[in-house]
Image (tube, helix red, strand yellow):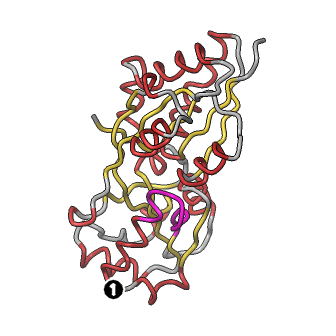
Amino acid sequence: MTTPIHILCAGAAKGLVQALQAEFEAAHDVKIEARYGAVGALKEALVAGAPCDLMVVTASMVNELSAAGWLLADSTAALGRVRTGMAVRAGAVAREATPDVSTPDALKAALLAANGIYFPDPARATAGIHFAEVMRQLGIHDQVARQFRTFPNGATAMHELATSTQAGLIGCTQITEINYTPGVSLLGALPDRFELATLYSGAVGAKSIQPVLALALLKLLSGDASKALRLAGGFEF
């Protein structure tokens, strides 16, 4: 088996990578070593020297790191856009009144009524930063702060939401992280006024030890072969 491919990957694309990992590893006789996390944390890891053959994060971060020489700009490929949405535990849909999050007023009421609000890092995660600002714009951030349940990334936040047994919980993160997490159900995207649709891209690391295989993996993640899987997970084109 060849040297592993090291990936730094945003949580929004975690489910996609994991769904395709076994197929790629078998086809290329290589092991994928993936590190998932908030975009800001992944940037810090790359700059600090973490091994990186392929990075999958927001397009804006890919552009920033390419301009700084950390990623190869000519290898960039887009996976698709991902909206930010609200979620509840899958079982809660049947047992509890499903919160309405379709308008700003409805979202505000749902958050005020929640016993716990699960979302990713409000300082370094794309969805977490945005959702914290949404609550400020709704005028309830400080009022509901004691209900916050924050985690390093959205995938972890959704997993913790799925496994909690408390009633009256709600969560927010990228729609792909909701759809790819067993045990949670998507309520819907944030109201139009607060919509956040983030374009995710990948690029080969400038110091990649496996640039050819990294590019092959990126083509799989962003190409026609995975388009149906991406659509099912919440990526939009």
Left or right, 127 with reference to 137: right
The picture places residue 177, in percent across and down from the top left corner, at: 48, 48
- Under mark 1, the amino acid is Gly
The picture places residue 34, in percent across and down from the top left corner, at: 66, 35
Residue found at the very far bottom of the displayed protein: 143
Which part of the image, by quadrant, shows the N terminus? top right
What's drawn in magenta, residue-wise?
A: 118-129
Determine the residue positioned at 35% across, 36% down.
Answer: 80
Determine the residue positioned at 55% across, 54% down.
Answer: 40
Q: Is residue 124 magenta?
A: yes
Q: Nearer the viewer, residue 234 or 68?
A: 68
Q: Image quadrant of residue 17?
A: top right
Q: Nearer the viewer, residue 172 or 1?
A: 1
Q: Secondary structure at mark 1?
A: loop
Q: Is residue 141 above or below residue 23?
A: below
Which part of the image, by quadrant, shows the C terminus? top left
The picture places residue 3, in percent across and down from the top left corner, at: 76, 18
Are there few (<14), some (14-19), or many (20+) residues within 10 Å of tag 1? Answer: few
Q: Is residue 99 magenta?
A: no
The picture places residue 38, in percent across and down from the top left corner, at: 56, 53
| Count of numbered tags | 1
Q: Which residue is mark 1?
A: 139
Q: Nearer the viewer, residue 117 or 122?
A: 122
Determine the residue positioned at 53% across, 75% down.
Answer: 167
Q: Is residue 76 above or below residue 119?
A: above
Q: Image quadrant of residue 137?
A: bottom left
Determine the residue positioned at 58% across, 29% down.
Answer: 205
